[in-house]
Image (spheres, rainbow, N blue to C red):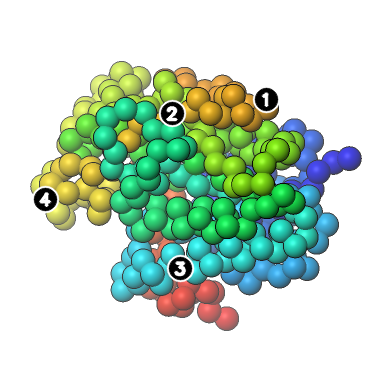
Amino acid sequence: MTKKVLIVGSQGYLGSRLTGYLKEQGYSCTGIDTGFFKGGILTSPDVTHTVSKDARLLEKKDLEGFDALILLAGISNDPFGHMTSKQIYDPTRDYALSIAEMCKGMNIKFIYPSSCSVYGAAADGFLSEDSPTNPQTPYSINKLQVEEGLSKMADKVFTPISLRFGTVYGMSSRIRFDVVINMLCGLALTTNKIILNSNGQAWRPHLHIDDACESFRCCLDWEPDTDNLVTLNVGRNEDNFKIIDIAKIIHSNVKGSELTYLRVDKNSEENELIKDRKIQDGVDTRTYKVSFDKISKTLPGFKCNWSVEKGIVDLLDKLKSINLDNDMFNRREFYRLQQIEYLHQINKINDDLYWNS
């Protein structure tokens, strides 16, 4: 029997790729999305039945008839403007756990995309799922809080799964250009510059978007034999890279490109594009290398098919094929905070990030 999957946050970067990926594998998918990024289309998106609704307003009737729910909805950057992290992330945590509670009561598998950023600033060596966490941002603190809530909820009949993704990159019909590999590839192709906003020495694991989708697919067909929250780092050991080394790979694949660092001029166009509040004096405090040994031994059928080198070449080829130019690359819909800030500034959404009627 075809499994019915509800994807909450289906019109974002990952959701737009995941719906088509799962349908290709024979799953029946329905999306729910508030529509903040619906218009940010780079290539033709998969056509999936999507209900226009805020994740905070989901009720049990919205979940009826589904075998599994994947919760992608949420703000994935720092707070903006006058809003505090508490205003943004407390509701995100609360609705994630509320939806999980509904899934538990309705016997629906619950899969949550967490992040390797929960490891934060770490010492040398590879970090496993059992290593101490040290989140450095409100976003990663929120991810950890949701995991803690899910852990309390888990029992013999409800086993939520938390997938700690590396930094996701790769092509999607609703791409994000505010994640490192996508951004640097876009910069290289449109400006012939690869601009780093730090010294590039921070370590980070990277995960191709199709491998992220594959991990979801494998989880849909898996029944873990445990009464605890299942936490898995998702990626390959070989895809832990320093940011400077990512930049060098892109540089070697874009003829004539220049590798440089962000100018001190705070009014520069590059500064506006790639500013990052987590960078202090050119040093990124978030640095961590992650072990992915557990997932290869634990999740049946899962294997990463993309190396960072292969994924970068593929992304560059696909961006070239659509003739990516400056106007396309700089569209605000491809930058999460820019789009949210814009909708707020023109009074389309209110201070609580609900659509104004």
Mark with earlier residue (2, 4): 4
Residue 287 horizontal/vertical position (percent): 29, 38
Question: Which residue lies under the disc numbered 3?
Answer: 90
Question: Which residue lies under the disc numbered 2?
Answer: 291
Where 208 falls versus 68 (above or below)?
above
Task: Give 27 or 260, whichever is nearer the viewer.
Answer: 27
Mark with earlier residue (1, 4): 4
- Element marked by disc 4: loop
**Residue 254, picture quadrant:** top left
Q: Separation of disc 3 and disc 4 at Cα?
A: 35 Å
Q: Check disc 4: other Cα within 10 Å, few if <14, some if 14-19, many if 20+.
A: few
Q: Check disc 3: other Cα within 10 Å, few if <14, some if 14-19, many if 20+.
A: some
Camera-nearest label, 1 or 4: 1
Question: Which residue lies under the disc numbered 1?
Answer: 301
- The answer to whether mark 3 and mark 1 are in CB contact below 8 A is no
**Residue 333, picture quadrant:** bottom left
Question: Which residue lies under the disc numbered 4?
Answer: 265
> In the orientation shown, which residue stands out farthest toward the bottom?
357
Q: Separation of disc 2 and disc 3 at Cα?
A: 29 Å
Q: Check disc 2: other Cα within 10 Å, few if <14, some if 14-19, many if 20+.
A: many
